[in-house]
Image (cartoon, rainbow, N blue to C red):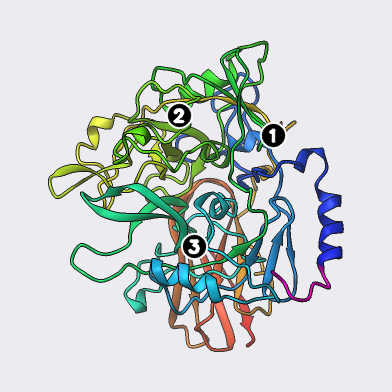
Amino acid sequence: MKRTEPCILVTAALLLIMQTAAFSQDYAIVDTGQDQCYNTLEIIGAPQPGEPFFGQDACYDGIQPHYQDNGDGTVTDLITGLMWQQSPDLDNKSTFAEALAGAETFDLGGYDDWRLPTIKELYSLADFRGSSPLLIPYIDTTFFDFRFGDESRGERVIDGQYWSSTEYVATTMGGDETVFGYNFADGRIKGYPKQFPGGGENELFVRYVRGNPDYGVNQFVDNGNGTITDEATGLMWMQDDAGDTMNWEEALEYAETFSYAGYDDWRLPNAGELQSIVDYTRSPSAPDPDRQSAAIDPIFHVTTDESYYWTGTTLREAPEDIGIGYNAVYICFGRAMGYMNGQWLDVHGAGAQRGDPKEGDPSNWPYGHGPQGDDIRIYNHVRLVRGGDATAVDGPTRGETERPSDFELAQNRPNPFNPETTIQFSLPEASRARLVVYNTLGRHVETLLNAPLSAGRHEAVFRAEHRPSGIYYYTLQAGAQHETRAMVLVK
């Protein structure tokens, strides 16, 4: 509890202003932030009803994030009612035991009732405009401090994983005790082992939370007509899934032409909506027989316990030689399988969130993909949703603009800056783009981007926490065109 609370009335007033009928739920699902549309490879103009790829995430507007910097090291989410630690310890990671114990003695902003967030609380911060190939994190760095993995410390760029308090009810990797976490570097929920098989405890970042203890608690009601309403989120769900598996484009088309129970406004859920109905107390391999099922409340029906379900959200993590729109987000309601050490294992836990190619032949990935051999299915299950606070976007999506006619490199903003700045640029046609930072001696400092991009407007972030003050130059090259600008770091 807070010992002195001079800001409570101000915060309460702001919450009353924000929490209209649309924001009245204890478990408000915040929009993913995704504001551009994609086909199976790249950014596209907003599809219209009846056109291919209509109905994806950016075709609908949900409750937009609304954060308040309290000026005391805390940030209040005025939509969820959660208050967050603004600046985690970015120099020291913690074991799971340390993360739990640290909450007991953590004191910030005059409050001492901090806790390690559940995976649903942590996921409420996810911003799916992120992309590790573009060095854009999956969290709003206007309000929250974050860093990518530091290769000079032996880390990978994508090592931006944060502990949650949600422990997996089964085990991964053939017997590892596991805790779910969210990676704000690459946009995935995975189960992480508490200890490494060879010895030593796993260490991740920690960001504490307080307030709204009901966040993430579902209140399902069976409507008796094949639909389920979650009174906590305001969403109505199909009780049955679609039965057949589909690729991503087929799933979108199925959703947009579906009519049931007197409603014709069903849609493919975005990542936040679908993750909201995961039941993290269940797994097909849970030791308790009463908990052995897909990770979803038994009020729902599933075609098979070992099922992955599509969302309408694109995961902007594709290899640079393929295209940023190649993968879409899916949620594992069954075990999150991967091929390791010559066998298929539950590598990330039922309730994980990963990404699959939107189209293709799964037989091309007989041993999965990535360091844990993530199972590539491509044809996933579908469960539709309607209602809540999502509204169809009328006309171009929020992030869409006309295709630029000229190659352009904008001045970074802010400038001067400390410790990070955003560089925006425009490409009149699809091409490989390379954005590089140099010092005043012309020596290479950092490559921010080196990837094929679609025509349109793009951005990258230069983070200079460990760089000295001074003038830096950044050069964009795409095809035969190039341009250079200067920026100033002031510490």
Q: Which mark is residue 443?
A: none
Q: Quadrant of residue 345?
A: top left
| Left or right of residue 360: residue 143 | right
Q: Name the amino acid, label 3.
A: Leu
The residues colored magenta run: 1-7
Q: Is residue 160 magenta?
A: no
Q: Name the amino acid, label 2.
A: Trp
Q: Which residue is mark 3?
A: 135
Q: Quadrant of residue 398?
A: top right
**Nearest to the observer: residue 33 or residue 439:** 33
Q: Secondary structure at mark 1?
A: loop
Residue 349 in the image, given as x and y percentages of width and height? 34, 45
**Mark 3 crowdedness (10 Å alpha carbons): few <14, some 14-19, many ≥20:** many
Q: Which mark is residue 248?
A: 2
* Quadrant of the rendering where the N terminus is positioned: bottom right
Q: Which residue is mark 1?
A: 390
Residues marked 3 and 1 touching at CB (< 8 Å): no
Relative to residue 367, is residue 223 depicted above or below?
Answer: above
Give the foreground label among 3 and 1: 1
Residue 219 in the image, given as x and y percentages of width and height? 62, 34
**Mark 1 crowdedness (10 Å alpha carbons): few <14, some 14-19, many ≥20:** some
Of callouts 3 and 1, the N-terminal one: 3
